[in-house]
């Protein structure tokens, strides 16, 4: 029997990279997309998968990416991130625009482009990595939380629109995960990024990837609608216990 194909966006680092490993381990043929092709190619070679450059903020890049994928059973919408932590009164529109482009419109573009192949597979599955930021707000976070709320709403709408079609829809809702996320958010400020995780044990990318692989390997009639996972020491986006 030929392998089922899993497409993972943002697979060059963090949760996406770990997900590529977990899905390859679970027996999927993995197709990886991100902007940093050097990292992606190395991982694809290791996993006997395929790497394609992908910028989800660029419609032409998404069209070329989707066009190069012959079939798709599982799509993991993972590419995303945050920029800045300014209060609304000091919001940087460029940061907001990027967060909406990558998290919301990026998810829309890739999903829209691959839905025909997901349906044609006869057993498709869309998993979207949103965030607990899609369910709460915090000071300085409005650009990111609003984008994650919108991404979550877009994702959940699919669950209803595709009722009756052979496509499952799972939202993965992580709390704090230690990745390059905070480093990018704070423009490479390592000290500030490290402070986010200080005094508690955050989730690892592998913790999230295991959950994604679990959802993707349930029997095809089982739809895990939403999975929320947080470090034990985190209550929400504003409260965590630090020692
Ligand atoms: P990360 O280590 O910074 O990885 C982000 C990934 O997204 C990278 O592979 C990056 O690859 C890719 N990416 C960024 N912009 C892209 C673009 N325009 N086109 C294609 N790929 C792009 O962060 P992460 O924590 O793993 O984040 C993965 C997802 O989890 C994001 O959606 C994030 O919002 C969500 N999340 C993270 C946390 C957390 O605490 N870390 C918590 C909840 C949810 P390139 O730079 O090579 O393009």
Image (cartoon, rainbow, N blue to C red):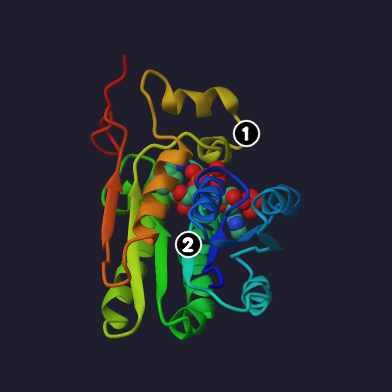
Q: Residue furthest right?
A: 38
The residue sitting at 27% across, 66% down in the picture is 223
Picture disc at residue 77: 2
Q: Residue furthest top?
A: 243
Q: Position of residue 24 (x, y in %)?
A: 55, 54
The secondary element bearing badge 1 is classed as loop
The secondary element bearing badge 2 is classed as strand
**Residue contact at pointers 1 and 2, CB within 8 angstroms:** no
Question: Dot 1 surroundings within 10 Å: few (below 14), some, or many (20 or more)?
Answer: few
* In-image side of 14 versus 150 (left or right): right
Q: Position of residue 91 (x, y in %)?
A: 46, 48
* In-image side of 6 versus 50 (left or right): left
- The residue wearing badge 1 is 188
Quarter of the image with the C terminus is: top left
The residue sitting at 51% across, 58% down in the picture is 27
Q: Who is closer to the viewer here, 73 or 87?
A: 73
Look at the picture and state if 15 lies above or below 5: above
* Spatial separation of the CA atoms under disc 1 and disc 2: 24 Å
Q: Who is closer to the viewer here, 73 or 185?
A: 73
Question: Dot 2 surroundings within 10 Å: few (below 14), some, or many (20 or more)?
Answer: many
Q: Earlier in the sequence, mark 1 or mark 2?
A: 2
Q: Who is closer to the viewer here, 218 or 229?
A: 218
Image-quadrant location for residue 198 = top left
Look at the picture and state if 216 lies above or below 176: below
Whether disc 2's CB lies below 8 Å from ligand 1 is answered yes
Q: Position of residue 69 (x, y in %)?
A: 63, 75
The reply to whether residue 84 is visible in this rendering is yes
Q: Residue furthest front?
A: 1
* In-image side of 36 versus 100 (left or right): right
The residue sitting at 39% across, 63% down in the picture is 151
């Amino acid at each position: 029997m030929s392998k089922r194909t899993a497409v993972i966006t943002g697979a060059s680092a963090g949760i996406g990279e770990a997900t590529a490993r977990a899905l390859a381990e679970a027996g999927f043929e993995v197709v990886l997309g991100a902007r940093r092709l050097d990292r992606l190619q190395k991982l694809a070679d290791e996993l006997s998968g395929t790497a394609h450059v992908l910028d989800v903020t660029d419609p032409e890049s998404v069209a070329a990416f989707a066009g190069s994928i012959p079939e798709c059973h599982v799509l993991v919408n993972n590419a995303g991130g945050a920029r800045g932590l300014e209060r609304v009164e000091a919001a940087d529109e460029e940061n907001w625009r990027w967060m909406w482009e990558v998290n919301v419109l990026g998810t829309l573009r890739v999903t829209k482009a691959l839905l025909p192949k997901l349906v044609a597979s006869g057993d498709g599955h869309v998993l979207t990595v949103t965030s607990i930021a899609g369910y709460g707000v915090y000071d300085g976070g409005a650009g990111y939380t609003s984008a994650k709320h919108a991404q979550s709403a877009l994702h959940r709408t699919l669950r209803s629109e595709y009722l009756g079609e052979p496509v499952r829809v799972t939202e993965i809702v992580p709390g704090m995960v230690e990745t390059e996320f905070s480093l990018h958010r704070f423009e490479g400020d390592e000290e500030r990024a490290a402070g986010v995780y200080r005094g508690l044990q955050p989730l690892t990318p592998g913790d999230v990837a295991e959950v994604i692989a679990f959802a993707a390997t349930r029997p095809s009639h089982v739809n895990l609608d939403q999975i929320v996972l947080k470090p034990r020491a985190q209550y929400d986006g504003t409260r965590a216990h630090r020692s």
